[in-house]
Image (cartoon, grey):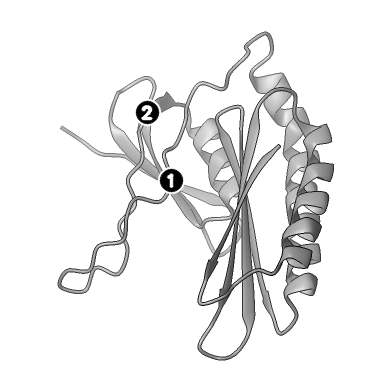
């Protein structure tokens, strides 16, 4: 696994970097082939440390974050969350994409930040055709409350979202 470690208002020391490498390398068992991991360590204004871990593998994105006063605690929690996600979704991914080497869609994460008239962050991503079930799976993997995708049947831009009662909603566009 290729691991990129960066800091925002935080300088990861060599001991922390070695610990991150060691712990993230243990997650390699969930994937065959090329995987990349990105780890962002930051210190928030409240004095808490925040660690965000993202793994890019087979076109899927697994992401977890944790905040605490101890960065090593954050690392352990992020690893636990990622391992739970991977073991929970690996079987579904294998069944859904049986016989395929790559997943059907791919996201391009985190475009450069741009500040204009209230826009705090801009993300750019590629919309590849998928079903609503695949979009729900991707939304759950990212731990987001909504996900925008291009419908494979209608070619329309749709949004799936998680409702307060833990069911899912679907917003479809019309021409």
Mark 2 and mark 1 residues within 8 Å of each other at the beta carbon: no
Position of the N terminus, as image quadrant, is top right
Coordinates of residue 40 in the picture (x, y in percent): 57, 62
| Residue found 58% across the figure and 34% down from its top | 60
Q: Is 140 in front, or is 43?
A: 43
| CA neighbours of label 1 inside 10 A, class few (<14), some (14 to 19), many (20+) | few
Query: Which dot marks residue 79?
Result: none
| Residue found 17% across the figure and 69% down from its top | 116
Coordinates of residue 138 in the picture (x, y in percent): 55, 40
| Residue found 34% across the figure and 52% down from its top | 123
The answer to whether 36 appears left or right of 162 in the picture is: right
User: Label 1's element?
Assistant: loop
Position of the C terminus, as image quadrant, is top left
Label 2 to label 1: alpha-carbon separation: 20 Å
| Residue found 72% across the figure and 60% down from its top | 17
User: Which is more N-terminal, label 1 or label 2?
Assistant: 1
In this rendering, is residue 157 above or below 97? below
In this rendering, is residue 152 above or below 37? above
Image label count: 2
Q: Residue furthest bottom?
A: 46
The answer to whether 164 appears left or right of 95 in the picture is: left
Q: Nearer the viewer, mark 2 or mark 1?
A: 1
Report which residue position mark 1 lands on: 109
Q: Is 163 in front, or is 65?
A: 65
Q: Is 94 in front, or is 22?
A: 22
Coordinates of residue 70 in the picture (x, y in percent): 75, 80
Report which residue position mark 2 lands on: 151
Coordinates of residue 31 in the picture (x, y in percent): 75, 29
The answer to whether 59 appears left or right of 65 in the picture is: left
| CA neighbours of label 2 inside 10 A, class few (<14), some (14 to 19), many (20+) | many
User: Label 2's element?
Assistant: strand
Q: Quadrant of residue 88?
A: top right
């Amino acid at each position: 696994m290729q691991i990129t470690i960066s800091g925002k208002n935080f300088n990861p020391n060599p001991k922390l970097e070695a610990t991150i490498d060691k712990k993230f390398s243990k997650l390699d068992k969930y994937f065959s082939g090329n995987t990349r991991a990105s780890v962002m360590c930051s210190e928030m204004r409240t004095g808490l440390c925040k660690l965000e871990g993202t793994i890019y593998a087979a076109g899927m994105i697994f992401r977890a974050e944790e905040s605490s006063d101890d960065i090593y605690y954050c690392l352990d929690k992020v690893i636990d969350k990622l391992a739970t996600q991977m073991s929970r979704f690996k079987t579904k991914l294998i069944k859904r994409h049986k016989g395929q080497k790559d997943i059907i869609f791919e996201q391009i994460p985190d475009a450069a930040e741009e500040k204009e008239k209230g826009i705090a962050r801009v993300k750019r991503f590629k919309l590849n055709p998928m079903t609503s079930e695949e979009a729900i799976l991707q939304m759950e993997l990212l731990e987001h409350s909504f996900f925008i995708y291009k419908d494979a049947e209608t070619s329309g831009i749709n949004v799936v979202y998680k409702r307060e009662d833990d069911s899912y909603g679907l917003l479809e566009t019309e021409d």
